[in-house]
């Protein structure tokens, strides 16, 4: 028998699972625990809270998610797949295509490069020049690469992106300057928020999809959460037909994360902090990412957003990751690591590896920008420059790896961090 394309096998397995066949796991199982009845997909979480878990998603949840997505976007369409089909974002591209019967355009790229994407996306857009609607899902890093290439004179990838009816961008926070640059170029960007436990994105541009409910749970006074009691900010909880059945083989974790209210509504408590303003959700960052410096809680996501804006003003759009490292005076010191564009490329370490001190003028500028917006305690005490931030999944920065790299750099510079 002739060998089949691996992606074709994935599509077939997902189709069979949605039609009532055996549950499909795109990655090797972590255990031999049997998923709940009705499970179609078993997906791994990214492991941001420790060891990864396996999430059980039912056919009903996946179909509800796909229907709500197309309702929000203006109708069913055909999807270009440029994300790995091992995580929820890539798997959902396949699921949406199968649910609507429009078919999958399977062109996962071994390594996402603007020139390769331009060729694939142009062919795809040409194919759909007379319908149906064209959609694609990206992570912020991919969008960043396309925008950076365009700013350097290679506009083919960004030009191809403008031909899509909607470009979903999720998996991590998208810096405001990056969104503004893409939208100014004519890209129909839709930011998404969700996770494996919610069948992927369920809040688009801050607004819940049809059937989805969002609330920010109250913050207890004195809690190490980065949110202030009485401000409307708190732990983000989500409810709706797209929720997972739970964690396979882990009933205690399932009971802690998935709870049912007295009215019968089932909710999933995320690890994220958020704020609701007139029904629109703003994500403030992860509760466990909060840096406590000098007794003040600092939310890294807010600092990263200001840094991204400052880098854009310098003509060097880039990505930032803010972490806390042990400090004898402050308890934790706020440190920023930035992956920069052309204007600061001379500061990237030789060979593109490791970190280099970006102090002096860059640090002074960042401290001023952050201090003016968020207050002096949030201003980074040091800044490092690197070629690229480490990832632990599509579009997700590995904060633990960043923090470890900063600690090594601090020791190399003779600033021995105290032990936590």
Image: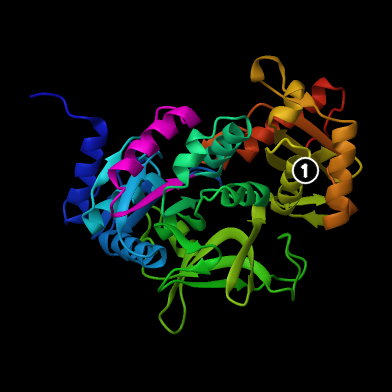
> How many residues crowd around disc 1 within 10 Å: few (fewer than 14), some, or many (20 or more)?
few
* Residue 70 part of the magenta-drawn span: no
Q: Which of the pair 120/365 is nearer the observer?
A: 120
Q: Which of the pair 268/373 is nearer the observer?
A: 373
Q: Which of the pair 125/273 is nearer the observer?
A: 125
Q: Give the percent coordinates (x, y) of residue 198.
A: 43, 60
* Residue 123 part of the magenta-drawn span: yes
Can you see residue 26? no
Q: Which corner quadrant holds the N terminus?
A: top left
- The residue sitting at the front extreme is 130
Color theme of the render? rainbow
Q: Height in image: 121 above or below 92?
A: above
Quarter assignment of residue 316 = top right
Q: What is the magenta range?
A: 109-138
Q: Give the percent coordinates (x, y) of residue 227.
A: 73, 64
**Does residue 257 appear left or right of residue 335 in this picture?**
left
- The residue sitting at the bottom extreme is 263
């Amino acid at each position: 028998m002739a060998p089949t394309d691996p992606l074709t096998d994935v599509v077939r397995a997902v189709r069979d699972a949605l039609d009532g066949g055996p549950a499909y796991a795109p990655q090797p199982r972590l255990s031999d625990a049997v998923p709940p009845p009705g499970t179609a997909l078993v997906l791994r979480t990214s492991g941001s809270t420790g060891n990864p878990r396996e999430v059980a998603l039912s056919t009903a949840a996946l179909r509800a998610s796909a229907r709500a997505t197309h309702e929000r976007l203006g109708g069913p369409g055909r999807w270009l797949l440029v994300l790995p089909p091992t995580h929820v974002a890539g798997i959902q591209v396949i699921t949406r295509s199968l649910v609507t019967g429009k078919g999958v355009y399977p062109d996962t790229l071994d390594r996402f490069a603007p020139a390769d994407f331009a060729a694939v996306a142009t062919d795809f857009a040409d194919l759909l020049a007379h319908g149906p609607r064209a959609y694609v899902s990206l992570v912020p890093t991919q969008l960043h690469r396309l925008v950076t290439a365009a700013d350097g004179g290679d506009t083919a990838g960004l030009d191809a992106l403008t031909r899509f009816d909607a470009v979903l961008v999720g998996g991590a926070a998208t810096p405001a300057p990056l969104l503004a640059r893409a939208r100014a170029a004519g890209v129909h960007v839709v930011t998404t928020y969700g996770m494996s436990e919610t069948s992927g994105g369920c809040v688009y541009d801050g607004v819940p999809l049809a059937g989805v409910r969002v609330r920010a749970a109250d913050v207890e006074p004195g809690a190490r959460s980065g949110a202030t009691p009485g401000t409307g900010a708190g732990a983000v909880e989500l409810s709706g037909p797209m929720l997972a059945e739970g964690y396979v083989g882990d009933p205690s974790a399932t009971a802690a994360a998935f709870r049912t209210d007295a009215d019968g509504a089932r909710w999933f408590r995320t690890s994220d902090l958020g704020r609701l303003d007139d029904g629109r959700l703003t994500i403030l960052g992860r509760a466990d990412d909060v840096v406590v410096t000098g007794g003040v809680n600092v939310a890294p996501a807010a600092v990263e957003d200001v840094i991204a804006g400052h880098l854009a003003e310098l003509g060097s759009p880039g990505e930032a990751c803010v972490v806390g490292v042990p400090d004898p005076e402050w308890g934790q010191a706020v440190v920023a690591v930035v992956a920069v564009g052309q204007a600061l490329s001379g500061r990237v370490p030789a060979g593109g590896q490791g970190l280099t001190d970006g102090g002096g003028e860059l640090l002074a500028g960042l401290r001023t920008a952050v201090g003016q917006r968020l207050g002096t305690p949030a201003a980074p005490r040091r800044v490092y420059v690197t070629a690229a931030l480490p990832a632990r999944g599509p579009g997700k920065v590995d904060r633990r790896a960043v923090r470890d790299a900063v600690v090594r750099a601090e020791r190399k510079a003779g600033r021995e961090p105290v032990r936590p």
